[in-house]
Amino acid sequence: MRGWIAALALSLAAGAAATELPIFDAHIHYSHDAWDVLPPEAAIAILRKAGVRRALVSSSGDDGQQRMVAAAPDLVLPSLRPYRTRAELSTWVRDETVIPYLEQRLARYRYIAIGEFHLYGADADLPVPRRMVELARRHGLLLHAHSDADAVERLFRQWPGARILWAHAGFERPEKVREMLRRYRNLWCDLAFRSDHAQGGRPAPEWRELFLEFPDRFMVGTDTFTPERWHYVGEHAAWSRAWLAHLPRDVAERIAWKNGEALFVAPLQH
């Protein structure tokens, strides 16, 4: 426990610095393995210390994020994950109980997205993912997809009007990301858990070109997929501000927080 407290203190100290540029963190998890060691109030304190303006939060299962929403509705934007536990990451696509679970949660709570879900290739056309997409369509929810390009294309074929946030920009090379963004105007990318877009504290040249071509299509994210990742929220926010500072100010502001606000918050205000 002492080690956890010390690590938490370091995280808060790192996040306290350089908070001039607000952050919209588009990739936060608060799952069952984090609840006991990190109470909702502590998780919220980490985000606020890091200068996170809002966070797109999902959890496995859904009770975790509901605790955070109840404690900080101004900060937490809820996304419904199709997992009850993280162990379902690779099995949910063939699990018929997923759809009743999603329907129950959608009837009880309000969400702005479904995901983050892991979905690859032809699995996107299986019955369970198809029914999930139909639920998202019916409720007007964005899809947060940890997917390869093939699965993203299949999702758009199922629902041409979908809005998709491509987790980790698909872990694809920038030339493939460019191809996908040019093809699908309703595709956005989070940059969570990858560092190839910034080298030596500056945007890598090929990524800089992408950011300037598509300044309204990228967001930052920490990806707290394990409890230990919460230690790095403040550090990640400071690192993001450092490389964003080498972009034109208006582009940096869009990637840091304005794109998230425009995609997730603005529609709620109309």
Image: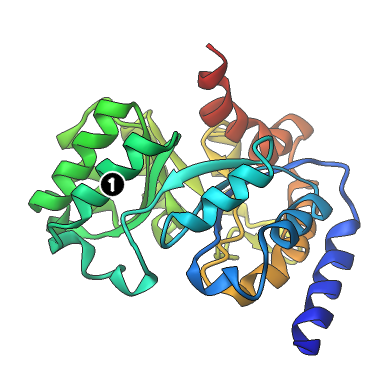
**Snapshot quadrant of residue 40:** bottom right
Q: Classify 10 Å Cα crowding around label 1: few (below 14), some (14-19), many (20 and above).
A: many
Q: Is residue 208 visible?
A: no
Secondary element at tag 1 = helix
**Snapshot quadrant of residue 179:** top left
255 or 206, which lies in front?
255
Which amino acid type corresponds to the residue marked 1 in the rendered image? Leu
* Residue sitting at x 79%, y 54%: 50
Q: Position of residue 95 (x, y in %)?
A: 15, 62
Give the farthest residue toward the top: 270
Q: Position of residue 146 (x, y in %)?
A: 37, 57
Q: Position of residue 172 (x, y in %)?
A: 40, 59
* Residue sitting at x 53%, y 21%: 268
Q: Position of residue 49 (x, y in %)?
A: 83, 54
* Residue sitting at x 26%, y 29%: 137
Note whether 115 is above or below 193 in the view shown. above
The quadrant of the picture occupied by the N terminus is bottom right
Q: Is residue 53 visible?
A: yes
* Colour convention: rainbow
What residue does disc 1 label?
102
